[in-house]
Every structure is written in C-alpha cells, then in structure tokens.
Image (tube, rainbow, N blue to C red):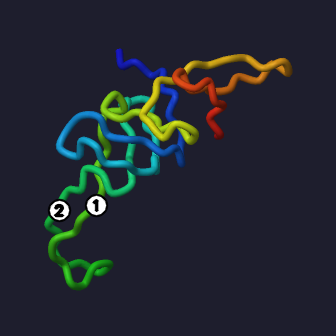
C-alpha cells in the first residue's frame, strides 16, 4: 500500500532535493495521491517521439514534464525561503493549517 499522506497542494512552491533536477525550484501543477507523485513545472523534462497525426500534423520530438515521487521534493517557506518540513496545527475555529517547522510561519494555501 502506498503512503497517501502528503502535505503538498497545487500551486505550492517546492524545491527538488533528490534526483537529476536536484536544487531546482518549481510550482506544483498536479498531485496524484494514489501513486504518491507530483507534477512540477519545468522539472523532470522528458522527450517523447510523436508521429504525425490529425491533431499534430508536424510530429517530431515533444518535451513535457513527467511526475516525480513526492518524497523527492520539499515545500519552500515564504518567510525563510528554505525547504522545510511541515507541521499541522488546529486553529481556534477548528481549521487545520500548515506551519513551517523552522520559523513557525503560517503557510498560505
């Protein structure tokens, strides 16, 4: 069974901490919780050869992002601008929010 608990959401800014794109920063485009993968903007670019079709008349080599495992990325804190771990806290109104473990700053959704 795949671990599905992931504190990453769409439009979060993340930094890659492992793999061929180590150190790059990008925005999360999609989160797949069943496969524990995230699609990050301009990260893990793959080239696919596509033959000409009705949709793509030219054909050729197409570059696109491929998903990477969510354990290879870390969320960037807006205040300290470093990759951080996340802690979840419950506010007075009962809402669960994400906090930076380094600077205790609220992470915007």
**Residue that carries the numbered disc 2 in the rendered image:** 48
Contact, mark 1 vs mark 2 (Cβ under 8 Å): yes
Q: Total label count?
A: 2
Residue 101, quarter of the rendered image:
top right
Residue under the image location 61 percent in, 25 percent down: 99
Relative to 43, is 10 on the left or the right? Answer: right
Per the rendering, the mark at residue 22 is none
Which of the marked residues, 1 or 2, is nearer the chain's N terminus? 2
Residue 104 is situated, as x and y percent measured from the top left of the image, at: 62, 24
Residue 70 is situated, as x and y percent measured from the top left of the image, at: 36, 32
Residue 69 is situated, as x and y percent measured from the top left of the image, at: 31, 33
- SS category of the residue bearing label 1: strand
Residue under the image location 32 percent in, 44 percent down: 67
Residue 16 is situated, as x and y percent measured from the top left of the image, at: 32, 40
Of 76 and 60, the residue lying toward us: 76
Q: Nearer the viewer, mark 1 or mark 2?
A: 1
Of 83 and 2, the residue lying toward us: 83
**Residue that carries the numbered disc 1 in the rendered image:** 64
Q: Residue furthest bottom?
A: 57
Disc 1 crowd, CA 10 A, few/some/many (<14, 14-19, 20+):
few
Residue under the image location 77 percent in, 24 percent down: 95
Disc 2 crowd, CA 10 A, few/some/many (<14, 14-19, 20+):
few
Quadrant holding the C terminus:
top right
Disc 1 from disc 2: Cα separation: 8 Å
Of 19 and 10, the residue lying toward us: 19
Q: Residue furthest right?
A: 93
Q: Is residue 49 above or below residue 16?
A: below
Q: Is residue 5 above or below residue 76?
A: above
Q: Is residue 37 above or below residue 5?
A: below
- SS category of the residue bearing label 2: strand
Relative to 64, is 105 on the left or the right? Answer: right
Quadrant holding the N terminus:
top left
């Amino acid at each position: 069974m795949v671990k599905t608990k992931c504190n990453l959401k769409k439009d979060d800014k993340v930094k890659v901490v492992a793999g061929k794109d180590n150190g790059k920063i990008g925005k999360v485009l999609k989160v797949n919780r069943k496969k524990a993968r995230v699609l990050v903007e301009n990260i893990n670019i793959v080239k696919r050869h596509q033959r000409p079709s009705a949709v793509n008349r030219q054909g050729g080599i197409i570059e696109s992002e491929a998903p990477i495992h969510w354990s290879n990325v870390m969320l960037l804190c807006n205040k300290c601008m470093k990759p951080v771990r996340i802690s979840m806290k419950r506010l007075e109104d009962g809402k669960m929010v994400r906090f930076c473990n380094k600077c205790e700053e609220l992470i915007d959704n």
